[in-house]
């Protein structure tokens, strides 16, 4: 995983205990490097505002996602204030818990001044050896990294809007303003043409490489062929145009006239693309946020059932969940899409998501304002015999919840939910704070 770039600038005054400031600086750099961060720092302490601005601008140009301003001693508040005003990048101030340095004294006036001026920042206080503090700093930095990585991202809507699904559509101006994401469009016809005209030898090679990796294969040769062609076509269109994130409309044109996108979406999600179904823009962004937080894949699915007694949320999807979330592709079967859903048919994946701690999240909008539902839990692998309770031909995730089920129900504002492996609630909470998004933690 690529290291996150972070800048560190340590401020002091020549008359103060510069020896303590220098030690704070070197200890902080060492501690954060030990957390696998790519640190950009300077050899000398910074005393002048102009030098602080110059160094911050230099770090920004080198691609850091955030800058930590260490208050090594008492400092001149304008050095911090003018730097934050001048250089548009996330800043945090860090005061050390050393009474000899008067670092916290500086922290009080700087933090208060920034708040009074309405300048966004994060305030940290504590030792460079404090595990809990370093955890908080890492969470902040990762949230800044998510923000940085989403900026100027291009999200491709393939095929347009699914009728009736209001909560999948977004205001493209709001998305651009809040996240910096550009929403663009590709017609389904382009994907269809790429699919039907795909080279036979390439499709045969894909089938030869991919199919032995799965378990039982129910669909006939024609259905498999069209499903693999859609995978080839969608990947080619996205790759040729430089997209890594897409919201794909499957119903009604493709699913009724050629093939469902289920297997294509699943395979592309496996490969590191972020693909939501049913043209869900909020879904694709939610998945990408989870992916950025975890450094791995995330899933798209429907909230199917909540068992109050067992505190288990069942998430079911018509086939596009990443197959590698099973833990073993040989345990993933390929089945035929249900006739009631698809006149043309298509291959679907059938598996249970493996046992793991998970984070679930869903972006939503209420009266024009964005919010994010986030909660932790544990996915619990279940036998496929249980799938008949819902849909036996579709992949499913069973999430043992670590939150109030009553509160959770009130914050389901979509038919869709998204999950990644690992616990990243605090990172997403910090990301929401940075973006002024209401973070709902049931």
Image (tube, rainbow, N blue to C red):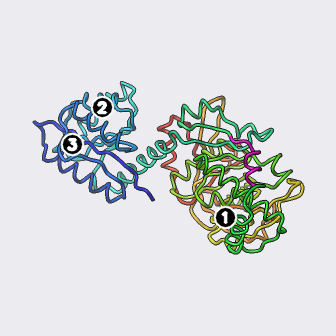
Instruction: State left or right for residue 4 relative to residue 179.
Output: left
Magenta region, main secondary structure? helix
> What kind of element bears circle 1?
helix
Where is residue 11? Give x, y as percent: 22, 39
Magenta run includes residue 166: no
> Disc 2 or 3, which lies upstream in sequence?
3
Q: Residue at image x 51%, y 47%? A: 428
Q: In the rendered image, which residue does mark 2 sit on? A: 83
Q: Residue at image x 26%, y 42%? A: 9
Which label sits on residue 72?
3
The residue mark sitting in front, 2 or 3, is: 2
> Disc 2 or 1, which lies upstream in sequence?
2
Instruction: State left or right for residue 152 relative to residue 137.
Output: right
Instruction: State left or right for residue 371 relative to residue 100.
Output: right
**Residue farthest to the left, as pictured:** 15
Q: In the rendered image, which quarter contains the N terminus?
A: bottom left
User: Viewer-proximal residue, 432 or 233?
Assistant: 233
User: Viewer-proximal residue, 350 or 153?
Assistant: 153
Q: In the rendered image, which residue does mark 1 sit on? A: 323
Q: CA distance from mark 3 to mark 1?
A: 50 Å
Q: Residue at image x 64%, y 72%? A: 328
Residue extent of the magenta highlight: 186-195
Where is residue 139? Give x, y as percent: 43, 50
Where is residue 326? Give x, y as percent: 65, 67
Give neighbour class at mark 3: few <14, some 14-19, many 20+ (Cα, 10 Å).
Answer: many
């Amino acid at each position: 995983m690529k290291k996150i770039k972070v800048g560190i600038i340590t401020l002091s005054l020549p008359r103060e205990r510069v020896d303590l400031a220098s030690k704070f600086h070197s200890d902080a750099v060492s501690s954060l490097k030990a957390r696998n961060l790519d640190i950009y720092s300077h050899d000398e302490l910074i005393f002048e505002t102009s030098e602080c601005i110059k160094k911050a601008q230099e770090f920004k140009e080198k691609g850091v996602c955030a800058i930590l301003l260490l208050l090594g001693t008492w400092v001149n508040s304008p050095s911090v204030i003018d730097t934050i005003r001048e250089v548009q990048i996330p800043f945090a101030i860090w005061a050390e818990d050393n009474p000899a340095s008067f670092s916290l004294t500086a922290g009080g006036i700087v933090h208060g001044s920034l708040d009074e001026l309405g300048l966004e920042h994060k305030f940290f206080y504590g030792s460079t050896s404090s595990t809990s503090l370093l955890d908080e700093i890492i969470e902040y930095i990762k949230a800044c990294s998510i923000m940085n990585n989403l900026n100027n991202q291009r999200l491709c809507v393939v095929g347009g809007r699914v009728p009736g699904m209001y909560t999948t559509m977004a205001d493209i101006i709001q998305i651009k303003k809040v996240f910096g994401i550009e929403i663009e469009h590709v017609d389904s016809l382009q994907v269809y043409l790429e699919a039907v005209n795909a080279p036979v030898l390439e499709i045969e090679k894909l089938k030869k490489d991919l199919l032995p990796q799965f378990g039982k294969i129910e669909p006939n040769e024609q259905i498999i062929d069209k499903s693999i062609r859609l995978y080839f076509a969608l990947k080619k269109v996205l790759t040729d145009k430089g997209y890594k994130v897409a919201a794909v409309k499957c119903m009604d044109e493709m699913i009724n006239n050629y093939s469902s996108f289920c297997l294509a979406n699943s395979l592309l999600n496996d490969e590191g693309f972020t693909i939501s179904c049913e043209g869900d823009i909020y879904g694709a962004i939610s998945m990408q946020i989870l992916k950025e937080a975890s450094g791995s894949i995330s899933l798209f699915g429907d909230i199917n059932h909540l068992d109050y007694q067992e505190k288990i949320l069942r998430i079911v999807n018509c086939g596009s969940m990443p197959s590698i979330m099973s833990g073993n592709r040989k345990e993933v079967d390929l089945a035929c899409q249900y006739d009631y859903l698809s006149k043309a048919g298509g291959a679907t994946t059938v598996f249970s998501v493996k046992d793991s701690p998970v984070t679930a999240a869903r972006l939503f909008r209420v009266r024009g304002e964005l919010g994010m539902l986030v909660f932790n839990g544990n996915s619990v692998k279940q036998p496929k015999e249980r799938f008949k309770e819902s849909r036996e031909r579709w992949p499913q995730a069973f999430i043992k919840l670590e939150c109030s089920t009553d509160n959770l129900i009130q914050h389901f504002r979509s038919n869709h939910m998204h999950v990644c492996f690992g616990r990243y609630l605090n990172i997403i909470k910090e990301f929401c704070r940075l973006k002024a998004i209401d973070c709902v933690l049931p």
